[in-house]
Amino acid sequence: MHRYIIKRLIYFIPVLVGVTFIVFTIMYLTPGCPATIRLGDQATTEQIERMRELMGLNRPFLVQFGSYLWGLVQGDFGRSLHTNRPVLGEMMIRFPNTMMLAAGGMAIAVVIGVLVGVLSSVKQYSFSDTIAMLFALVGISVPNFWFGMMTILVFAVWWSGAFGYSLFPSSGFDDGIRSLVLPALTLGTSSAAIVLRMTRSSMLEVLRQDYIRTARAKGLKERVVVFKHALKNALIPVVTVVGLQFGFLLGGAVFTETVFSFPGSGRFIVEAIRSRDLMVVQGGVLFLAIAFSFINLLVDLLYAVIDPRIRTQYKAQQWNIPWLRRVKKYGQ
Amino acid sequence: MGKKLLEIKGLKVHYITDDGTVPAVDGIDMEIEEGESLGLVGETGAGKTTTALGVMNLVPDPPGEIVDGEIIFNGENLREKSREAYRKIRGNKISMIFQDPMTSLNPVYTVFDQLEEVIKLHQKVSSSEALQRAKEMLAKVGIPEERGEEYPHQFSGGMKQRVLIAIALACNPALLIADEPTTALDVTIQAQVLEVMKDLKKQFNMAMILITHDLGVVSEICEKVAIMYAGKIVEFADLESLFTKPSHPYTVGLFNSIPDPEEDVTELTPIKGLIPEPTELPPGCVFHPRCPDVMEVCKGSFPETVELSPTHRVACYKYHEGIGGEPK
């Protein structure tokens, strides 16, 4: 198991280099010279030229990429072109907020999605199943930002109009958990719909399996058959979706954070795009990519917790590195 | 004669689909005494498994439905039982083993988990006693107890079937229904599993319904045989009279299709034709289109059952007085 984790961490390296390359290339090809942005519109050509020299922008593409990579290895994600503050530090202040928001959204999505999904699979084609599927359709189709504004309208504006106080704050992050409710709900709705659909179809598949018949033949209560025997098996594909959705939520938080003026990393990046702060965009996107990779690893480990077959597979992992094999072979 | 354990009277299980109603089990009668083994023999699609699921009250609903009949177990009509009461009988007094051991164990729980579960469910025992009992059961089916901590995917097919047998027998049932327990296993393992079942049946003194299409297996284990064809029991007899005097033309056809190892056979002699589509059963006797002895009367209605002897009955016009020309 440890071996598997270490192996996965080693596989991170090429993935991260690849992601960095893509992000770096896009930023490199983006029109607009960082030196000009840094100095402002009034700068003279000579000043800009000197700044380009100073920032190393005259060097060939690959050299620039290499030095950026080298910086990353040392924890240097670059500095903001406007404030000159390190991107990593700025992200570290805001990312926990986004993480909390995404976790909240995911919690809502998982609780609603799995529960309703299970019920809906047990009562397939019933009235409640139809209602659940309708909810799923609406949940997927409704745009995030619109739904966010609607929650603000209902819970903050109308509610305070009717009762004189607002049930949940509609912006910022000053009220602890309470200020998380509306943005998390907004963020989680579409994921809830996707998790619901996945749970339902996975459960329908599992409920047809022979071992469910065995469980019933034992005389188990239907509740035990569904939640103990079926659900644990049905969760495996659901975990995949939850993992992917979590990554999506980190990125999708951009809209939600903007609607709710939430001090998260998504809004930070959006503001950087507006002010053409290329270094922040580049570092921020990379930071999120790394976070996403880690979440993926966690998901893969979660599989092993649920499914003993995968656990056995992980345990059996060998170091499959060609040169190491060759060294061993010749060593004998 | 021992005490009657299970008596099925006029059981009808229908599958109701958009394409029409399929009478998978169409009015069957059979009985089984305590400690006795009954072989339920027939082709695929004859309704053997549906009969078993009917007794267990596990017919998938929808589309299946028990439409008529009585299932009397230990003097009580099971069809009048509440779901809750039925649940307490299932896995406890009546157990079932299924056809495919590879997929019949839950892959995410250990063998002990799955074995202890049924013990704890039906018997008032503590966890440690349940574990002890689970270990004993594993030993009885010949699996080392330390392997109980393992998961089903670490077991071979034969071992999985033995685990399933252990689960089925854990609560000492009065009746075990074994639905083709060896069909999915290879031949050497088949013998092994059958041996275990025979052994345990004697030890536990339980009755058994063995569903199979292998008359050889039946002759080894069973005392009674029911031959099923297209949802009907066409012949019901004790082992000896069935093997010495097979009476229904279908049974005769089954025996004829077994090649004789003594003779130099180049070609098998199958029963002509195919089992009919379940949605388009022929009128009259369901077997008449394939029957070598077909008469005009066979096309009219399904024949009443005739008793050839107290332990041998057959549903065929050949044995009807005044029709078949061969009065009793």
Image (spheres, coloured by chain):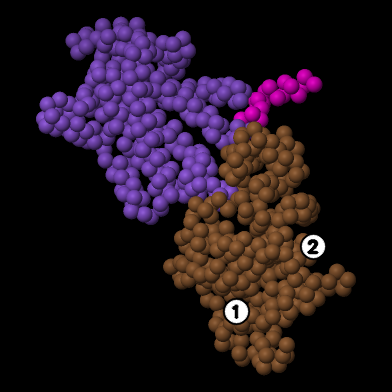
Closer to the camera, B53 or A198? B53
Image x and y of residue A307, in percent: 56, 36
Q: CA distance from mark 1 to mark 2?
A: 29 Å
Query: Which chain is disc 1 placed on?
Result: B
Please report the residue visible at 77 percent of the width from the left and 70 percent of the height from the top. Answer: B239
Quadrant hosting residue A139: top left
Horizontal side of residue A284 vs B26, given as left or right: left
Image x and y of residue B190, in percent: 76, 54
Q: Is residue B31 visible?
A: yes
Q: Is residue B229 visible?
A: no
User: Who's purple, chain-wise?
Assistant: A
Horizontal side of residue A231 vs B152, given as left or right: left
Q: Which mark is residue B220?
A: 2
Closer to the camera, A191 or A69? A191
> Quick check: A210 above or below B109?
below
Label 1: few (<14), some (14–19) or many (≥20) C-alpha neighbours in 10 Å = many
Please report the residue visible at 38 percent of the width from the left and 35 percent of the height from the top. Answer: A111
Query: Which chain is disc 2 placed on?
Result: B
Q: Which residue is mark 1?
A: B286
Q: Quadrant of the N terminus of chain B?
A: bottom right
> Quick check: A49 above or below A135?
above
> Quick check: B320 above or below A311?
below
Horizontal side of residue A151 vs A239, given as left or right: left
Total labels drawn: 2
| Magenta residue span | A313-332
Quadrant hosting residue B141: top right
Horizontal side of residue A41 vs B253, given as left or right: left
Q: Find numbered disc 2 in the image and state the secondary structure of the residue it sits on.
A: helix
The colour chain B appears in is brown
